[in-house]
Amino acid sequence: MSTILEFQRATKAFRGVPAIKNIDFAVRQGEIHAIVGENGAGKSTLMKVLAGVYELTSGALLFEGAPLVMKSPADAIRHGIAMVFQETNLVPSMTVAQNIYLGEEMLFNRLRGLYIRAQRFLLSLNFYVDPMALVSSLGAGKKQLVEIARAVHHHARVLIFDEPTATLTPEEKFHFFNLIRRLQRQGLSIIFISHALEEALTLSDRITVLRDGEVVATDDTRNFDREWLVQCMVGRSLSTQLYGAAGGRKARTYGEEILSVRNLSMGNLVRNTAFSIFAAQVTGLFGLVGAGRTETMKIVGGVLKRDFFHGGEIRFKGRPVRYRTPRPAVLDGIVYVTEDRKVEGFFESMSIAENLQIGRLATGTNPMTFVTLTEARRLAREWTERLGLRAIDPGARVIELSGGNQQKVVIAKSLVQKPKLVIFDEPTRGVDVSAIVEIHRFINELANDGIAVVVISSYMPEILALSDRILVARQGRIVEEMDIAEASEAKIMFAAVH
Amino acid sequence: MGKAVVIAVFRRAYAAFRGFDDETGSVPMMDGPLRPNALLDAMPVVLTLPDVDNLSAWRDGLMCSSGREAFRLVRSKDSLAIAERHVFEGPVSCLAAERGGGLAVGLDGQGVIVVEGPHAGRKISEVGGQPLSCPTAALFDGPDRLVIANGAASVTTADWKRDLMEHGASGAVWDVDLARAEAAPALLAGGLAFPSGLALAPNGGLFVSEAWRHQIVRIEGRIVDAPPRALVRDLPGYPGRISPRRAGGFWLAMFAPRNQLVEFVLREHEYRRRMIDNIDPAYWIAPALSSGASFLEPIQGGARKKLNRLKPWSPSWSYGLVARCDAAMRPIASFHSRADGRVHGVTSCCELEGAFYAAAKGSGIVVAMDIAGAEGETPA
């Protein structure tokens, strides 16, 4: 196979600090090339250079043997390079169809024709998304599908996927993998960034491992196995640290019943569900996308409102509560750590210290109180150390951090509120293996300190590794509860789909 | 009528605004440490005795009662054997055993008699000028002090369903100084909704299970000004007797399950009044210690319409449930016998020589298991 794309000694530096350095990397025509590495390893930077978002500081990018300089993403699209970003970059106030055809508007647009075209196109991809739906009304999984559809629509010759399957259900993943293979058969080259190593191992033809901005290994996939891949990524064996603890583990003892939810209902998304949450335990909440897990917990945290009549009851520490906004929930000690960090998790143009300070303001601090910058920085320093946050400099804006470190900021921003119940929604989504270990350790520490922790995750090994008790949601209600000692992937999945 | 409707509308609107679940009267689900299992059914039967009740450890064996009789039980290989039998003048409603050998027996409708120990022969038949007609539980706090729970002021223990259906809250806990014959029983707490179990709290005071309010309260000894403080609220069953665990903490027997239908009937005053007036208590819509024995039991072939479809539905009237609690009476594990089980209506349980025993009055059996199994098991 001929080489379609090649980086030669490519370096990209931010404020003099190289995010990637001296990268030699080639993509062949019609191959699926997986790129793996910890967060902060430089994967996203490398791909953003390829997508025209960044320009190289030094080195060269060759496209079909000729040097290529791209000034903008539009340049990349013109050359047939399209990227599906890790965090969706759709316009929330536009419909699905308008997002797919964004930038191709004519002087007079006929919306009906646009919707019909989009409907046909989405169906051809086996994506069941309403083209007339506003993107803001879609869940994370469906937003991802629209993002993929938009990239496929651009007739790209090189398609770059950054964590494409993180939010997809098993069925959606199955369709997605079929789509990838179909595109490969059509001669497209696909670059695939994923933290799900099994996906990289099963789907790709070749794998490149990045660590600290450098290429550590590039080889045919058949020459890798999971253990070797992880070792290449982190320079040490982490697989047992990550998910090895699952199975036959003894659960923590039940603490006080801190949250009792009864007959909770919200439209068709949460339907008469009931469960309890106990202190000093990690309660895992598993379910497929659309099972109502996030919505249920958002109601608990005051982000969403339950039905006014027949909406059920929530008791926090024995007291009936109805939160209409998150602030009273935060004041009571309930925090919800969002799954969509980019939109709901932080203020991207602010520094870590400013984000943490905003988190602390929600805890009822007198608005007239004068907060010194020194105090805010001290708080940021404390949490930076506690969570092992790595930033280029202490004043760095959150947008300049890697995905894992951004997630740590979101967690820290919630935990400065000194909660009694913490709800983590997909806490390690789009986070590298090293950060996963740190986040898992931190979640366990919270439970050991007597805090009630809920972890919503679509990744079964994570649920099994973290939880003392597992709740399974299906079609808007909790349908199964199991102790970690008796839980298995098969049992959980059976409950989630039957 | 119109006034009642208007008040109900405002009550519901206020409940919806504040977030109470006023309409459905929901029963807490059995989850977490109270998650259903079949561990009670898995325990071997060590004694079969109709209406077995009041299981308690005394001297080197166990005591239990059945109707007017009390029995001393001894271990015999893998079962229990009756070593002594005593007959009393009325049905035995509670037993209190003391480490030093004291034994007190509560007789339904008659009071409590001390039958063994230094105060043998002492009879307490009145408390606060009222007859002690419903002695549901008693315990010795030292050789000279007896604490008695009087479930209700005007009904007997056998008539417990009536007290529930009449929203009874006339129960009380009394402290009797056995050393001074002239001393009147002292009221520790009144206005309780069927106190049915007693235990000494680790740091002084008493734990009392208040069955009709589905909660465990703490009474601070003789401090009259300190009202009972609820420790564990909203249990999914009716809590009964409490027994200490050797390893710390307590066993709590819950003699019947709560269900939506009973909660509904408890809110429907006119329906309930007519049910009480016209129907045999055995067939009331009320919790029971055992069920399934008669075709006259309510809603055996019940159904309900949901989403325009008729679905078979029949609540379980009886159940078997024992909770293992920590020192603060918080359930940390549980042992169940579900709707199809054979260990229903567990009214008492206790430990003896490394074994755990539970007496199922509804099923008329005593089941047992090694404490190591009970402690090591994490059924919840």
Image (tube, coloured by chain):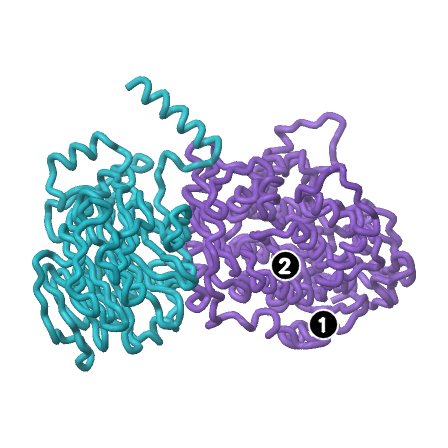
Chain colours: A purple, B cyan
Q: Nearer the viewer, residue B51 or B140?
A: B140
The chain letter for the residue carrying disc 2 is: A
Indicate which disc residue B177 carries.
none
In the rendered image of this protein, does residue B210 appear above or below residue B201?
above
Residue ranking furthest to the top: B2
Q: Position of residue A233 (x, y in %)?
A: 71, 71
Residue B374 occupies which quadrant of the picture?
bottom left
Report the amino acid beneath label 2: Thr
Q: Earlier in the sequence, mark 1 or mark 2?
A: 1
Total of numbered circles in the picture? 2
User: Gap in Å between the C-alphas at discs 1 and 2?
Assistant: 17 Å
User: Can residue A208 be seen here?
Assistant: yes
Image quarter of the C terminus of chain A: bottom left
Q: Are marks 1 and 2 on the same chain?
A: yes
Indicate which disc residue A428 carries.
2
Tell me the residue at 51%/60% (across/down).
A281
Q: Position of residue A424 (x, y in %)?
A: 59, 54
User: Can residue B342 be seen here?
Assistant: no
Residue A6 occupies which quadrant of the picture?
bottom right
Q: Position of residue A308 (x, y in %)?
A: 47, 32
Q: Nearer the viewer, residue A187 or B120?
A: B120
- Residue occupied by mark 1: A234
Left or right of B301? Residue A121 is right
Q: Helix, strand, or loop for circle 2?
A: loop
Q: Helix, strand, or loop for circle 1?
A: helix
Report the amino acid beneath label 1: Val
In the rendered image of this protein, does residue B260 appear above or below residue B113?
above
For the residues bearing labels 1 and 2, Cβ distance under 8 angstroms: no
Left or right of A259? Residue B53 is left
Q: Nearer the viewer, residue B164 or A16?
A: B164
